[in-house]
Amino acid sequence: MTASIVIVGAGFSGAVVARQLADAGIASWVIDGRSHVAGNAHTERRPNGVMVHVYGPHIFHTADTRVWDYINRFGVMETYNHRVKATSQGAVYSLPVNLHTINQFFGLTLSPSEAEQFIASRADSSIGTPVSFEDQALKFVGRDLYEAFFKGYTQKQWGVSPTELPASILARLPVRFSYEDSYFNHPFQAIPRDGYTPIVEAMLDHPLIEVTLNKKVTPEELKSAEHVFWSGPIDEYFGGRFGRLGYRTLDFVETEAQGDFQGCPVMNYCDPDVPYTRITEHKHFAPWETHEGTTLYTEYSRLAEEGDIEYYPIRQVKEKEQLHQYVEAARNAQKVTFLGRLGTYRYLDMDVTIKEALEVADEFLACRRDSRPMTPLVVQPL
Protein backbone atom coordinates (compact mmCIF):
# COMPACT_ATOMS: atom_id res chain seq x y z
CA MET A 1 0.00 0.00 0.00
CA THR A 2 1.50 3.33 -1.06
CA ALA A 3 -0.98 5.71 0.63
CA SER A 4 -2.79 5.47 3.95
CA ILE A 5 -6.11 6.48 2.36
CA VAL A 6 -7.48 3.77 0.04
CA ILE A 7 -10.37 4.29 -2.37
CA VAL A 8 -11.91 1.17 -3.85
CA GLY A 9 -13.52 1.99 -7.19
CA ALA A 10 -12.42 4.40 -9.93
CA GLY A 11 -15.86 5.51 -11.00
CA PHE A 12 -17.27 8.95 -10.27
CA SER A 13 -17.60 8.27 -6.52
CA GLY A 14 -14.00 7.23 -6.05
CA ALA A 15 -12.54 9.79 -8.46
CA VAL A 16 -14.34 12.73 -6.85
CA VAL A 17 -13.27 11.75 -3.33
CA ALA A 18 -9.69 11.18 -4.48
CA ARG A 19 -9.52 14.55 -6.21
CA GLN A 20 -11.06 16.46 -3.31
CA LEU A 21 -8.59 14.90 -0.92
CA ALA A 22 -5.68 15.56 -3.29
CA ASP A 23 -6.67 19.20 -3.68
CA ALA A 24 -6.54 19.40 0.13
CA GLY A 25 -3.02 17.89 0.14
CA ILE A 26 -3.97 14.32 1.09
CA ALA A 27 -2.63 11.37 -0.92
CA SER A 28 -4.77 8.38 -1.80
CA TRP A 29 -4.53 5.06 -3.59
CA VAL A 30 -7.40 4.31 -5.98
CA ILE A 31 -7.96 0.66 -6.89
CA ASP A 32 -10.35 -0.76 -9.48
CA GLY A 33 -10.88 -4.32 -10.70
CA ARG A 34 -11.57 -3.24 -14.28
CA SER A 35 -9.06 -2.27 -16.96
CA HIS A 36 -10.40 1.28 -17.19
CA VAL A 37 -11.63 4.12 -15.00
CA ALA A 38 -15.12 5.71 -15.01
CA GLY A 39 -17.02 2.56 -14.00
CA ASN A 40 -20.28 2.06 -15.88
CA ALA A 41 -19.96 5.56 -17.37
CA HIS A 42 -16.95 4.39 -19.41
CA THR A 43 -16.91 5.54 -23.04
CA GLU A 44 -14.90 4.37 -26.05
CA ARG A 45 -14.65 5.53 -29.65
CA ARG A 46 -15.32 2.72 -32.12
CA PRO A 47 -13.38 2.28 -35.42
CA ASN A 48 -16.28 3.90 -37.29
CA GLY A 49 -15.72 7.04 -35.19
CA VAL A 50 -18.82 6.73 -33.03
CA MET A 51 -18.40 7.40 -29.31
CA VAL A 52 -20.03 4.49 -27.48
CA HIS A 53 -21.36 4.46 -23.92
CA VAL A 54 -19.96 0.99 -23.28
CA TYR A 55 -22.30 0.08 -20.41
CA GLY A 56 -25.40 1.76 -21.79
CA PRO A 57 -26.49 5.38 -22.21
CA HIS A 58 -25.40 7.95 -19.64
CA ILE A 59 -26.98 11.40 -19.82
CA PHE A 60 -25.68 14.02 -17.41
CA HIS A 61 -28.45 16.17 -15.93
CA THR A 62 -28.63 18.14 -12.70
CA ALA A 63 -30.12 21.12 -10.90
CA ASP A 64 -27.15 21.32 -8.53
CA THR A 65 -24.86 24.23 -9.41
CA ARG A 66 -21.95 22.86 -7.39
CA VAL A 67 -22.10 19.55 -9.23
CA TRP A 68 -22.43 21.25 -12.61
CA ASP A 69 -19.47 23.55 -11.95
CA TYR A 70 -17.44 20.63 -10.66
CA ILE A 71 -17.79 18.37 -13.70
CA ASN A 72 -17.06 21.31 -15.99
CA ARG A 73 -13.64 21.65 -14.34
CA PHE A 74 -12.54 18.43 -15.98
CA GLY A 75 -13.95 18.47 -19.51
CA VAL A 76 -16.09 20.22 -22.06
CA MET A 77 -19.79 19.52 -21.53
CA GLU A 78 -21.88 19.88 -24.67
CA THR A 79 -25.53 20.84 -24.28
CA TYR A 80 -27.69 17.82 -25.01
CA ASN A 81 -31.46 17.44 -24.73
CA HIS A 82 -32.38 13.78 -24.36
CA ARG A 83 -35.49 12.53 -26.16
CA VAL A 84 -36.80 8.98 -26.07
CA LYS A 85 -39.24 7.26 -28.39
CA ALA A 86 -41.26 4.11 -27.75
CA THR A 87 -42.62 1.45 -30.06
CA SER A 88 -45.92 0.07 -28.77
CA GLN A 89 -48.65 -1.89 -30.53
CA GLY A 90 -47.25 -1.11 -33.97
CA ALA A 91 -46.80 2.65 -33.58
CA VAL A 92 -44.06 5.02 -32.37
CA TYR A 93 -44.72 7.52 -29.56
CA SER A 94 -42.81 10.06 -27.48
CA LEU A 95 -41.80 9.37 -23.89
CA PRO A 96 -42.40 10.38 -21.20
CA VAL A 97 -46.11 10.19 -21.93
CA ASN A 98 -47.10 13.74 -22.84
CA LEU A 99 -49.91 15.60 -24.54
CA HIS A 100 -48.76 14.49 -27.99
CA THR A 101 -48.59 10.85 -26.83
CA ILE A 102 -52.10 11.04 -25.35
CA ASN A 103 -53.66 12.65 -28.41
CA GLN A 104 -51.87 10.28 -30.78
CA PHE A 105 -52.66 7.15 -28.76
CA PHE A 106 -56.36 7.92 -28.31
CA GLY A 107 -56.84 9.69 -31.68
CA LEU A 108 -57.89 12.95 -30.03
CA THR A 109 -57.00 16.67 -30.13
CA LEU A 110 -57.26 17.52 -26.44
CA SER A 111 -55.98 20.70 -24.82
CA PRO A 112 -53.83 20.38 -21.67
CA SER A 113 -56.77 20.84 -19.30
CA GLU A 114 -58.98 18.52 -21.36
CA ALA A 115 -56.26 15.88 -21.40
CA GLU A 116 -55.83 16.10 -17.64
CA GLN A 117 -59.54 15.59 -17.12
CA PHE A 118 -59.59 12.79 -19.68
CA ILE A 119 -56.77 10.86 -18.00
CA ALA A 120 -58.34 11.40 -14.58
CA SER A 121 -61.58 9.88 -15.90
CA ARG A 122 -59.68 6.76 -17.04
CA ALA A 123 -57.61 6.36 -13.85
CA ASP A 124 -58.64 3.74 -11.30
CA SER A 125 -60.09 5.81 -8.47
CA SER A 126 -60.82 2.69 -6.42
CA ILE A 127 -57.12 2.37 -5.53
CA GLY A 128 -56.39 4.18 -2.28
CA THR A 129 -52.74 3.93 -1.32
CA PRO A 130 -50.87 2.14 -4.14
CA VAL A 131 -48.84 -0.85 -2.96
CA SER A 132 -47.46 -2.21 -6.22
CA PHE A 133 -46.06 -0.68 -9.39
CA GLU A 134 -49.25 -1.73 -11.16
CA ASP A 135 -51.43 -0.05 -8.53
CA GLN A 136 -49.46 3.17 -8.92
CA ALA A 137 -49.78 3.19 -12.71
CA LEU A 138 -53.48 2.32 -12.76
CA LYS A 139 -54.27 4.97 -10.14
CA PHE A 140 -52.63 7.72 -12.18
CA VAL A 141 -52.94 6.84 -15.87
CA GLY A 142 -55.49 4.03 -16.20
CA ARG A 143 -55.23 0.65 -17.86
CA ASP A 144 -54.80 1.62 -21.52
CA LEU A 145 -51.66 3.73 -21.08
CA TYR A 146 -50.34 1.38 -18.42
CA GLU A 147 -50.54 -1.66 -20.68
CA ALA A 148 -49.23 0.20 -23.73
CA PHE A 149 -46.15 1.84 -22.18
CA PHE A 150 -45.39 0.46 -18.72
CA LYS A 151 -46.51 -3.11 -18.13
CA GLY A 152 -44.55 -5.06 -20.74
CA TYR A 153 -41.42 -2.91 -20.54
CA THR A 154 -41.34 -3.10 -16.75
CA GLN A 155 -41.80 -6.88 -16.73
CA LYS A 156 -38.89 -7.29 -19.15
CA GLN A 157 -36.71 -4.87 -17.22
CA TRP A 158 -37.27 -6.41 -13.79
CA GLY A 159 -38.10 -10.02 -14.67
CA VAL A 160 -41.23 -10.09 -12.51
CA SER A 161 -44.83 -8.96 -12.82
CA PRO A 162 -45.40 -5.25 -12.00
CA THR A 163 -47.77 -6.51 -9.30
CA GLU A 164 -44.68 -7.75 -7.42
CA LEU A 165 -42.75 -4.48 -7.65
CA PRO A 166 -43.16 -1.68 -5.09
CA ALA A 167 -45.11 1.44 -6.02
CA SER A 168 -42.03 3.55 -5.22
CA ILE A 169 -40.40 2.51 -8.51
CA LEU A 170 -43.04 4.63 -10.25
CA ALA A 171 -42.92 7.39 -7.70
CA ARG A 172 -44.10 10.30 -9.81
CA LEU A 173 -47.04 10.86 -12.15
CA PRO A 174 -45.59 9.58 -15.45
CA VAL A 175 -47.55 12.03 -17.62
CA ARG A 176 -47.01 15.58 -18.89
CA PHE A 177 -50.00 17.59 -20.03
CA SER A 178 -47.96 19.62 -22.51
CA TYR A 179 -46.06 18.91 -25.71
CA GLU A 180 -42.72 19.03 -23.88
CA ASP A 181 -40.94 15.80 -24.79
CA SER A 182 -37.55 16.29 -23.14
CA TYR A 183 -36.84 13.22 -21.06
CA PHE A 184 -35.36 15.24 -18.18
CA ASN A 185 -36.39 18.61 -16.79
CA HIS A 186 -33.17 19.68 -15.05
CA PRO A 187 -31.69 23.07 -16.03
CA PHE A 188 -28.27 21.55 -16.79
CA GLN A 189 -28.29 18.73 -19.34
CA ALA A 190 -25.19 17.68 -21.26
CA ILE A 191 -22.85 14.98 -22.48
CA PRO A 192 -19.05 15.35 -22.43
CA ARG A 193 -17.68 16.24 -25.85
CA ASP A 194 -14.91 13.68 -25.53
CA GLY A 195 -16.74 11.10 -23.44
CA TYR A 196 -16.93 10.41 -19.73
CA THR A 197 -13.71 8.44 -19.37
CA PRO A 198 -11.40 11.43 -20.09
CA ILE A 199 -13.29 13.43 -17.46
CA VAL A 200 -12.67 10.80 -14.79
CA GLU A 201 -9.06 10.45 -15.97
CA ALA A 202 -8.66 14.21 -15.52
CA MET A 203 -10.09 13.99 -11.99
CA LEU A 204 -7.53 11.32 -11.15
CA ASP A 205 -4.64 13.18 -12.81
CA HIS A 206 -2.92 14.52 -9.71
CA PRO A 207 0.50 13.74 -8.19
CA LEU A 208 -1.14 12.76 -4.89
CA ILE A 209 -3.38 10.15 -6.53
CA GLU A 210 -2.07 6.70 -7.44
CA VAL A 211 -4.36 4.55 -9.59
CA THR A 212 -4.11 0.77 -9.88
CA LEU A 213 -6.38 -1.02 -12.36
CA ASN A 214 -7.11 -4.72 -12.92
CA LYS A 215 -6.81 -5.34 -9.19
CA LYS A 216 -9.35 -6.86 -6.85
CA VAL A 217 -8.88 -6.22 -3.15
CA THR A 218 -10.48 -7.54 0.01
CA PRO A 219 -11.11 -5.63 3.24
CA GLU A 220 -8.55 -7.90 4.92
CA GLU A 221 -5.85 -6.57 2.60
CA LEU A 222 -6.75 -3.00 3.55
CA LYS A 223 -6.90 -3.36 7.34
CA SER A 224 -3.76 -1.27 7.85
CA ALA A 225 -5.20 1.71 5.95
CA GLU A 226 -5.98 4.89 7.85
CA HIS A 227 -9.35 4.99 6.09
CA VAL A 228 -11.07 3.16 3.25
CA PHE A 229 -13.68 4.62 0.93
CA TRP A 230 -15.54 1.63 -0.44
CA SER A 231 -17.67 2.09 -3.58
CA GLY A 232 -17.82 -1.62 -4.36
CA PRO A 233 -20.79 -3.80 -3.36
CA ILE A 234 -21.57 -3.43 0.34
CA ASP A 235 -22.28 -7.16 0.65
CA GLU A 236 -18.90 -7.96 -0.91
CA TYR A 237 -17.14 -5.93 1.79
CA PHE A 238 -18.69 -8.13 4.45
CA GLY A 239 -18.00 -11.36 2.57
CA GLY A 240 -21.67 -11.98 1.81
CA ARG A 241 -22.35 -12.52 5.50
CA PHE A 242 -26.10 -12.00 5.12
CA GLY A 243 -26.41 -13.36 1.60
CA ARG A 244 -25.79 -11.86 -1.82
CA LEU A 245 -27.83 -8.78 -2.66
CA GLY A 246 -29.82 -9.00 -5.88
CA TYR A 247 -29.21 -6.95 -9.01
CA ARG A 248 -30.47 -6.83 -12.55
CA THR A 249 -27.78 -6.86 -15.20
CA LEU A 250 -27.83 -5.97 -18.89
CA ASP A 251 -26.64 -7.81 -21.99
CA PHE A 252 -25.89 -5.73 -25.09
CA VAL A 253 -25.81 -7.03 -28.65
CA GLU A 254 -23.64 -4.54 -30.53
CA THR A 255 -24.03 -4.12 -34.28
CA GLU A 256 -22.76 -1.65 -36.85
CA ALA A 257 -24.55 -0.33 -39.92
CA GLN A 258 -24.49 2.55 -42.36
CA GLY A 259 -26.62 5.65 -42.25
CA ASP A 260 -29.20 6.36 -39.56
CA PHE A 261 -30.94 3.30 -38.12
CA GLN A 262 -33.74 4.76 -35.99
CA GLY A 263 -33.43 8.55 -36.02
CA CYS A 264 -33.20 8.89 -32.23
CA PRO A 265 -30.77 7.90 -29.47
CA VAL A 266 -33.12 5.50 -27.63
CA MET A 267 -36.13 3.52 -28.81
CA ASN A 268 -38.00 1.63 -26.08
CA TYR A 269 -39.87 -1.53 -27.04
CA CYS A 270 -42.89 -1.79 -24.77
CA ASP A 271 -44.60 -4.90 -26.13
CA PRO A 272 -43.99 -7.99 -23.97
CA ASP A 273 -43.44 -10.27 -26.98
CA VAL A 274 -40.34 -8.29 -28.04
CA PRO A 275 -37.52 -9.86 -25.99
CA TYR A 276 -35.33 -6.76 -25.69
CA THR A 277 -36.15 -3.57 -23.81
CA ARG A 278 -34.61 -0.93 -26.06
CA ILE A 279 -32.20 -0.14 -28.88
CA THR A 280 -29.62 2.59 -28.40
CA GLU A 281 -28.05 4.35 -31.38
CA HIS A 282 -24.95 5.95 -29.91
CA LYS A 283 -24.11 8.55 -32.52
CA HIS A 284 -27.25 10.46 -31.58
CA PHE A 285 -25.69 11.12 -28.14
CA ALA A 286 -23.21 13.40 -29.95
CA PRO A 287 -25.28 15.56 -32.34
CA TRP A 288 -22.26 17.85 -32.76
CA GLU A 289 -20.51 15.02 -34.65
CA THR A 290 -21.21 13.58 -38.10
CA HIS A 291 -20.76 9.88 -38.94
CA GLU A 292 -21.65 7.86 -42.00
CA GLY A 293 -21.67 4.67 -39.96
CA THR A 294 -23.68 3.91 -36.84
CA THR A 295 -23.33 1.69 -33.76
CA LEU A 296 -26.34 0.06 -32.13
CA TYR A 297 -26.88 -1.62 -28.79
CA THR A 298 -29.84 -3.98 -28.46
CA GLU A 299 -30.44 -4.30 -24.73
CA TYR A 300 -31.67 -7.30 -22.74
CA SER A 301 -32.25 -7.34 -18.99
CA ARG A 302 -31.81 -10.35 -16.70
CA LEU A 303 -30.98 -11.32 -13.13
CA ALA A 304 -27.31 -10.74 -12.33
CA GLU A 305 -25.26 -13.83 -11.57
CA GLU A 306 -21.83 -14.21 -10.00
CA GLY A 307 -19.31 -12.21 -12.04
CA ASP A 308 -21.90 -10.10 -13.88
CA ILE A 309 -21.83 -6.31 -13.88
CA GLU A 310 -24.42 -4.98 -11.47
CA TYR A 311 -26.73 -2.29 -12.91
CA TYR A 312 -30.00 -2.04 -10.99
CA PRO A 313 -30.44 -2.97 -7.33
CA ILE A 314 -33.63 -5.01 -7.05
CA ARG A 315 -34.59 -3.78 -3.56
CA GLN A 316 -37.60 -6.02 -3.13
CA VAL A 317 -38.57 -7.36 0.30
CA LYS A 318 -35.80 -9.98 0.49
CA GLU A 319 -33.07 -7.54 -0.51
CA LYS A 320 -34.31 -4.81 1.81
CA GLU A 321 -34.17 -7.17 4.76
CA GLN A 322 -30.60 -8.11 3.85
CA LEU A 323 -29.69 -4.47 3.32
CA HIS A 324 -30.87 -3.57 6.84
CA GLN A 325 -28.42 -6.17 8.16
CA TYR A 326 -25.57 -4.86 6.03
CA VAL A 327 -26.31 -1.28 7.06
CA GLU A 328 -26.08 -2.23 10.73
CA ALA A 329 -22.78 -3.99 10.03
CA ALA A 330 -21.55 -0.89 8.17
CA ARG A 331 -22.45 1.37 11.09
CA ASN A 332 -20.29 -0.77 13.35
CA ALA A 333 -17.39 -1.00 10.91
CA GLN A 334 -14.18 0.86 11.61
CA LYS A 335 -12.22 3.19 9.31
CA VAL A 336 -14.47 2.66 6.28
CA THR A 337 -17.04 4.78 4.44
CA PHE A 338 -19.52 3.26 1.99
CA LEU A 339 -20.64 5.35 -0.95
CA GLY A 340 -21.85 5.17 -4.52
CA ARG A 341 -24.37 2.96 -6.25
CA LEU A 342 -22.89 -0.34 -5.09
CA GLY A 343 -21.75 0.83 -1.68
CA THR A 344 -25.23 2.06 -0.74
CA TYR A 345 -27.28 -0.34 -2.90
CA ARG A 346 -29.23 2.38 -4.70
CA TYR A 347 -29.59 3.28 -8.35
CA LEU A 348 -27.98 6.73 -8.53
CA ASP A 349 -27.82 9.21 -11.37
CA MET A 350 -24.36 10.63 -12.02
CA ASP A 351 -25.13 14.03 -10.53
CA VAL A 352 -26.28 12.49 -7.26
CA THR A 353 -23.19 10.26 -7.22
CA ILE A 354 -20.94 13.32 -7.58
CA LYS A 355 -22.93 15.33 -5.03
CA GLU A 356 -22.71 12.62 -2.39
CA ALA A 357 -19.01 12.02 -3.08
CA LEU A 358 -18.36 15.74 -2.60
CA GLU A 359 -20.26 15.63 0.68
CA VAL A 360 -18.35 12.54 1.81
CA ALA A 361 -15.05 14.29 1.07
CA ASP A 362 -16.25 17.42 2.89
CA GLU A 363 -17.08 15.31 5.94
CA PHE A 364 -13.75 13.50 5.89
CA LEU A 365 -11.80 16.75 5.66
CA ALA A 366 -13.88 18.28 8.48
CA CYS A 367 -13.24 15.22 10.66
CA ARG A 368 -9.51 15.52 10.04
CA ARG A 369 -9.57 19.22 10.84
CA ASP A 370 -11.55 18.69 14.06
CA SER A 371 -9.73 15.49 15.09
CA ARG A 372 -12.93 13.47 15.30
CA PRO A 373 -13.69 10.03 13.87
CA MET A 374 -15.35 9.67 10.48
CA THR A 375 -18.88 8.27 10.59
CA PRO A 376 -18.62 4.81 8.99
CA LEU A 377 -21.77 5.14 6.88
CA VAL A 378 -22.05 8.73 5.68
CA VAL A 379 -24.57 8.03 2.92
CA GLN A 380 -27.79 6.45 4.15
CA PRO A 381 -28.98 3.78 1.70
CA LEU A 382 -32.46 2.97 3.00
Image: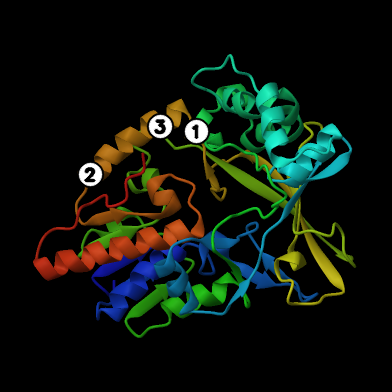
Q: Residue type at mark 2?
A: Arg
The answer to which of marks 1 and 2 sits earlier in the sequence is 1
Q: Residue at x 62, y 38 (%)?
A: 174
Snapshot quadrant of residue 5: bottom left
Q: Tell me the distance, in whole angstroms, between the alpha carbons under discs 3 and 1.
A: 13 Å
Query: Compared with residue 207, is residue 197 higher up or lower down, i.e. above or below?
Result: above
The answer to which of marks 3 and 2 sits earlier in the sequence is 3
The answer to which of marks 3 and 1 sits earlier in the sequence is 1
- How far across and down, in percent of the image, does residue 83 sit? 71, 56
Q: Residues within 10 Å of mark 2 (few under 14, many from 20)?
A: some
Q: Which residue is mark 3?
A: 320
Q: Residue at x 30, y 80 (%)?
A: 23
> Which residue is most to the bottom?
207
3 vs 1, front mark: 1
- How far across and down, in percent of the image, does residue 319 sit? 44, 32
Q: Residue at x 87, y 59 (%)?
A: 261
Do tag 1 and tag 2 residues touch (Cβ < 8 Å)?
no
Query: Compared with residue 269, is residue 51 higher up or lower down, i.e. above or below?
Result: below
Q: Residue at x 39, y 65 (%)?
A: 14
Q: Which residue is mark 2?
A: 331
Snapshot quadrant of residue 364: bottom left
Q: Which mark is residue 168?
A: 1
Q: Residues within 10 Å of mark 1 (few under 14, many from 20)?
A: few
Q: Residue type at mark 3?
A: Lys
Q: Residue type at mark 1?
A: Ser
Q: Which mark is residue 4?
A: none
